[in-house]
Amino acid sequence: MKRALFSAATIALLLGVIASAQIKDEIWATVPVNTRIEFVARAYDGSVFAYVQALWAAPGSEVFAGEIGPKLIAAARLMFDGREALMVFVAPATTGYFWPTDLAFVQGYTQYGVGYGDYFALSGPFSGQLLSGTVSVGFVALPSALDLTKALMLYYDDKMQGPMGPFRLP
């Protein structure tokens, strides 16, 4: 049931939300700065592998407006047992590997990892080898232990990428 709902949401997403396969600059600019992040993922040799954008799947956001957006957010929450999620876009500059499990959230003195059940691909491969010139999209669940009224730091491959949050007002 969850997978069927997600398959329908994926088709709707690809047709209605990501017409050009990337978030347009004018739409990205409407997302509050504290609920989005952009970073460059690097290969082990230090070369640029991919450009990554992540945003909180927030109800009422222009990115998730219209008829499709709320259904997509509801599907993500259903898939992740009510947890909030980030929508993550990965655009590889070269063919290489992206692992959602290399994402980590740090809040206070605690680090929270991403497990294999904490992400879901919406388009093509979202984990493993990604081909240059493609864009992969998926959801990554936020750990339930995070306090969404406080800021957190996002890490990828043990490298700090920057702050996010707070997502909600205290």
Image (cartoon, rainbow, N blue to C red):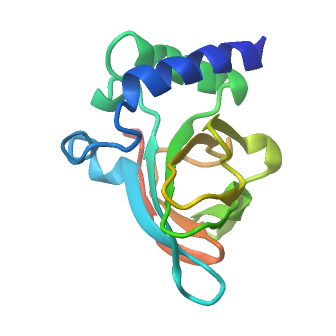
Q: Outermost residue toward the bottom? A: 45
Is 33 above or below relative to 15?
Answer: below
Give x and y (percent) for residue 144: 67, 41
Locate residue 45, reporting x and y percent.
62, 90
State which quadrant residue 15 falls in: top left
The mark total stands at 0
Give the image quarter of residue 151.
Answer: bottom left
Q: What residue sits 65% from the left and 77% below the top?
A: 158
- Quadrant containing the C terminus is top left
**Is residue 162 in view?**
no
Question: Does the image show residue 38?
Answer: yes
Q: Position of residue 51 (x, y in %)?
A: 45, 64
Work out which quarter of the rendered image holds the N terminus and state it.
top right
| Camera-nearest residue between 10 and 79 | 10
Say which residue appears at 39% left-offset and 61% top-offset.
Answer: 38
Q: Is residue 169 above or below residue 13?
A: below
Q: Is residue 53 left or right of residue 8?
A: left
Say left or right for 97 vs 36: right
